[in-house]
Image: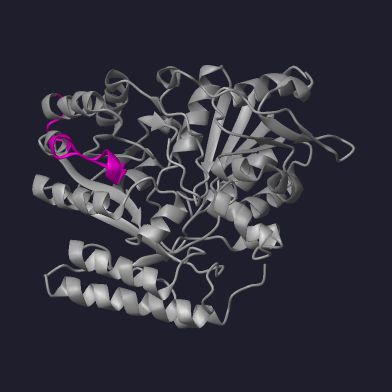
Amino acid sequence: MKILLVYPLIREFMVPSMPPLGLAYIAASLKEAGHEIKVVDLNGDRGNGLSYLTKLLSNESFGMIGVSSIITQYKRVKELGELIKSIVPHTPLILGGPGPTSIPELYLKNCSADIVCMGEGEEAVKEIADYIQNKMPLELCKGIIFKKQDGSYVNTGKRSQIKDINTIKFPAWEMFYTIKVYLENYLFKHGRKKGMSILSTRGCPGECNYCMCNFGRMLRMRTAENIFSEIEALVRKYDIEHIHFIDDTFITTVKRVREISDFFKHEFRSLTWSANVRVNFIKPDVLKIMADSNCVSLAYGIESGSPTVLDYMKKGFTAVQASNAIKWTREAGISMTTYFMIGMPCETKETVRETIDFCKQNLVGGEFFFVTPIPGAELYEYAKENKIINDEDVYMEHVGEVRDFLVNLTNMSNEELFAIKENAELEIKEHLGRHNITVKQSVRKNPRELVHSLPKF
């Protein structure tokens, strides 16, 4: 069956820099099943992608169309669904990815979709294609919600997760004519010419209340051999120079870190690499192993220096553990990025002061992201229960980047929250400047203007 896969526009204010990994996995899975696949990447091909898509829809016949997206692409998915159905109203439209998984009914209702795939899609999408091709009842396919002819919805229930993720086919980047754009503009390439994302684990045992935990709480790991087979292919095909592990939980055991580091050290000495890491999984000996194998940077989601806020977030670590991780990372000679947010319901001037002091003492930070409730997270339910979010469709249309301000969950006024954020950033930046540390400014709008232009949800 001929299948069309589409990736919507995202972060139009910057060059395409994060390849659509999820859709590449789906393309590989469908290709393995024998289907004829075409991919249109509207984010990577911003000049001609839309006209190319329109031409394909008008001139070719597809058995089904799939769109993969994250939460911040909701508005684009709505627009894309309307366009697709205006040209091919009877072709089944399937939505998947973290966005539709987080709030499937809303996507089914508002995005012109026929089917929403919930959770991991590699196995489910093959079944969906078979059911459509062979005209079998969709009720038999687990892990989807679909719209019947009478307009009613059918939820087939949760699908079992893929237990052995080593069996999953590597992402089919050869099907993306836009791949060069992503490699050369990769967000985390750390000064190298070409970089690429690798997902070495799925799932996260953390319980952070602001995270939807897309792959569930059960941690599943790929073997070092499987990971490096993928890296070998990327080096051979695209001559990449940097790998970034986008896992929620990269460090699982010392043994696994040692195996992965040994591969970099002995087989790919010319490559540099980086990873997202939890501070409570960090130890000096582990960092030394990583540094010796060309690990050049780690990203820590510390979020707050206040014990009160960390406990509220259910981060699972303390400010002391975070300080130790920062200290040990510096001692290992690895650079780091630290992320902080402001605006949890328990946030006060006092808790912000604790975070300021933490950043100054540890010489990190400099910019705060606003807390944004996202579907699938405990914090999102809190916002709905407290009537902070009333119209989910309108809210989702406005969910954008982490630097944007959408809702105020605190007891402070909007003006107070903005003033505290600005003053905190200024104080930290001035302190870091005295230690010759420069903080990049990435705010895209005047924060003061945002206070008076917030939409009603």
In the rendered structure, the answer to whether residue 296 lies left or right of residue 318 reads left
**Residue at the (46%, 43%) spot, across then down:** 207
Residue at 68%, 19% (x, y): give it. Answer: 130
| Residue 193 located within the stretch drawn in magenta | no
Relative to 99, is 385 above or below? below
| Res 62 seen here | no
Image coordinates for residue 22, horizontal then vertical, percent: 48, 36
Location of residue 220 by image quarter? top left
What x and y, as percent, mark residue 234?
A: 30, 30
For residue 85, which quarter of the picture?
top right
Front position in the image: 108 or 419: 419
* Residue that appears at 70% across and 22% down: 141
The answer, for residue 418, to whether it is visible in the render is: yes
Q: Nearer the viewer, residue 201 or 411?
A: 411
Viewport quadrant of the N terminus:
top right
11 to 172, vertically: above or below = below
Q: Nearer the viewer, residue 420 or 398?
A: 420
Question: Residue 429 at what x, y percent from top left?
Answer: 24, 73
Q: Is residue 279 magenta?
A: yes
Going 67% across and 72% down the picture, which residue do you hit?
456
* Quarter containing the C terminus: bottom right
View extreme (right): residue = 150
The span picked out in magenta is: 267-286
> Relative to 441, does residue 151 appear above or below in the rendering?
above
Q: Position of residue 90 (x, y in %)?
A: 79, 37
Q: How many marks?
A: 0
Q: Is residue 219 left or right of residue 335?
A: right
**309 and 395: which is toward the camera:** 309
